[in-house]
Image: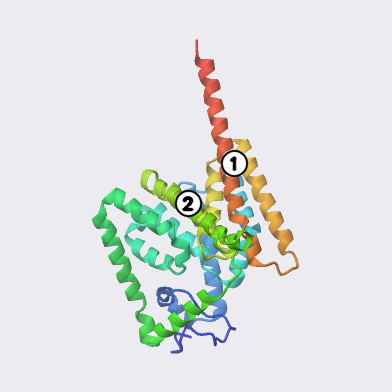
Amino acid sequence: MLINYQTPYTFDTPYGPYPGVWMPTTLGMFFLFGYISCDIASKLWLLAELAGFVWVIWMIADYKMPSRWVFFICVFVLFFFPPLWLHIRLGQFSMLFVVLMVVGIYLPMAERFLPLLLVLGLTKPQLAILVFPGLLIYVWRKKGFRQVVKLVLVTGICAGLLTVPLFLYYPGWVNDFLFVTFDNLGVGWDLPTLFVQLPFLLGNAGYAVWGLTLLAAMGISFWFWYHKDAKIALIISLAATPMVTPYASSWDFLLLMPGFFWLIIKLKSKAARVALLLGMAIIIVVQIAQLWRQDYPDGRQWWIPPLMILIYLISLLIEYSIVKITKTQLLQKAAP
């Protein structure tokens, strides 16, 4: 629509009543896709997402492919994870958000492109509520406040430059963008988030429970960004986001998958891996059973992020307990 000098923000689209609500910077970055057919563009988009997630596995495994069976499990679980199906069918952005963030943190050579990665990540700002502040905390700790200011300024400049194609092709896009965005936010979507579902279940007390959960997630996430390795902090922030963000859909649950990749690659004990895989299998089977041949409300899937995080924590607890027991036994054997 943009390359045909039409507003990209409208309810009257040729592909149905689905207004584009992505940030203008993304439209400016990818507007050249408008010059190729929708079929080819969609295939390129899908290829970038799937190849990007294989790249994420490679980066999490310390820049090498993990063992064959571990890689097979990663791909197998990803493929059967129902949010992936809906994500692909709707051409969503969550997978690319994960790829952009992992590239920005895991690849040292990507640091010079970090402002551009952050701008593109803001395509869905609700996914960045833990990652972006945490990243600023990390930069402040490692390089000082000046670098934080520089990063913010350069990111803002990149954002401004990426809106140039919109002004060239349809100068009046700003009013349409604001209208469509605020209209979309005003709809009472049945979202699978604690912010939406807890008030429905608990009344006003649900907002308090969500607020405490958000504060706890922010505290834990920001602590890891400040005190620990940014790679671990990113995995934690991504996993916690679908649970605490006010605005997310079930396809955004793919932010939890890097946590699964990290665990299945890093865990050493068989018991911890079995607990992780058994828990994931139960979640996937229940989801498939709910979605099988029926229109299951998206909001009813709010339980998935908390349960997946619980399974992650259980597997880590099992790993820690086994390591501690093993160390104790070795010390006892070594004692005279």
Spot occupied by residue 326 in the image (x, y as percentages of width and height): 55, 26
User: Disc 1 marks which amino acid?
Assistant: Ile
Q: Is residue 3 left or right of residue 300?
A: left
Spot occupied by residue 57 in the image (x, y as percentages of width and height): 52, 52
Q: Nearer the viewer, residue 153 or 114?
A: 153
Residue lying at 50% horizontally and 19% vertically, measured from the top left = 331
Q: Is residue 116 left or right of residue 258?
A: left
Spot occupied by residue 305 in the image (x, y as percentages of width and height): 58, 55
User: Residue 129 appears in which quarter of the rendering?
Assistant: bottom left
Residue at the limit of the structure toward the right, as seen here: 293
Residue at the limit of the structure toward the top, as seen here: 336
Residue at the limit of the structure toward the bottom, as seen here: 5
Residue 32 position (above or below residue 60): below
Disc 2 marks which residue? Answer: 217
Disc 1 marks which residue? Answer: 314
For label 2, count other residues whose C-alpha is less than 10 Å away and answer few (under 14), some (14-19) or many (20+). Answer: many
User: Disc 2 marks which amino acid?
Assistant: Ala
Residue lying at 56% horizontally and 43% vertically, measured from the top left = 313
Q: Nearer the viewer, mark 1 or mark 2?
A: 2
Spot occupied by residue 303 in the image (x, y as percentages of width and height): 63, 56
Residue 279 position (above or below residue 51): above
Distance (Cα) linking label 1 and label 2: 17 Å
Residue 67 in view in this figure: no
Q: Secondary structure at mark 1?
A: helix
How many discs mark residues in the rendered view?
Answer: 2
Residue lying at 43% horizontally and 80% vertically, measured from the top left = 178
Do labels 1 and 2 touch, CB within 8 Å?
A: no
Q: Is residue 296 left or right of residue 23?
A: right
Residue 203 position (above or below residue 181): above
Q: Secondary structure at mark 2?
A: helix
